[in-house]
Image (cartoon, rainbow, N blue to C red):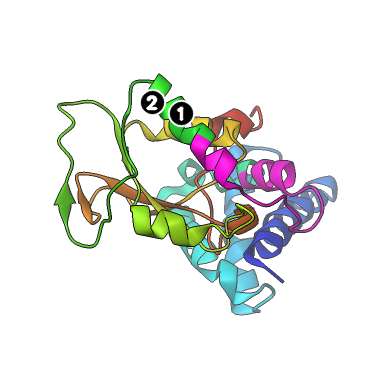
Amino acid sequence: MSYVEDIKLLVDTAMTELQDAKNNGKVQANPNSEESFLCRWVAQAGKKQRFNPSVTPNMTEWVQQGRSMGKNAHIKGRMAHISAVYHHQFPVGDEHAAITREQFDALVTSLEDADWMVHTEHEITRKVRVLSEGQSSFAVCAKALAASFNEAGELTKSLSLYVRGQEAGFVELLLSHGLLVTKVTDYKSIVKYHGEYKIWPHNRATSLVVLPESLKPAS
């Protein structure tokens, strides 16, 4: 199975078993009880190795947050958001259309239209600095860009995007072009003051994508 299938199975199973526990009167329908149940559930699922190792980092993070933050960890809301995003993008298993150069070029045009400073024409092989004078900026290594798409114009390997700008809006813009991203680093990347994100072939990232707020279910 892929990470896409693994994370869908994890959160869907957790939400189903939470609902079953509520229906059977084992858990009260309130945030404290639900968060406590999910924290215990994730911890036990991890110990029993119920799910593939690809989702172990997610489970470890949720257990730590649940134990330190209690109901404020919002594990239930996080799982519901993950389920909504992944089922929206992958209605059947991990099937998804190819990501194309045309989509990437359309993204670049949208960024330029939104007055972002865009750099796609140079190689990025060492630490560099982009002077944007406060302007949001976007950079991609030209060599990596050329190597990531095949002759048919389909993305065949992950591609790093270097971004300095408001994350939520950037992620929504990506989504409007059919793209999801994972985050590698918030700030310290090879491009100074820029975070590093990655797009993946068929959107099949090997870790959790940055979740678009527009796909978050109403609480």
**Distance CA(mark 2)–CA(mark 1):** 5 Å
Task: Identify the image quadrant of the C terminus.
Answer: top right
The mark found on residue 161 in the picture is: none
- Find the magenta span and give its range: 82-105
Density class for disc 2 (Cα within 10 Å; few <14, some 14-19, many ≥20) is some
Question: Which residue was labeled with disc 1?
Answer: 109
Residue furthest to the bottom in view is 48
The mark found on residue 112 in the picture is: 2
Left or right of 94, for residue 103: left
Where residue 127 sits in the image (x, y, percent)? 16, 57
Q: In the displayed structure, would residue 59 be above or below residue 88? A: below
Q: Residue at x 52, y 41 (%)?
A: 104
Where residue 133 sits in the image (x, y, percent)? 14, 27
Q: Say what amino acid the circle numbered 2 marks.
A: Glu
Where residue 113 sits in the image (x, y, percent)? 41, 20
Given residues 110 and 173, the one toward you in this image is 110
Left or right of 13, for residue 205: left
Density class for disc 1 (Cα within 10 Å; few <14, some 14-19, many ≥20) is some
Q: Does the magenta portion include 72?
A: no
Q: Disc 2, disc 1: CB below 8 Å?
A: yes
Secondary element at tag 1: helix
Q: Say what amino acid the circle numbered 1 marks.
A: Thr
Q: Residue at x 74, y 54 (%)?
A: 12
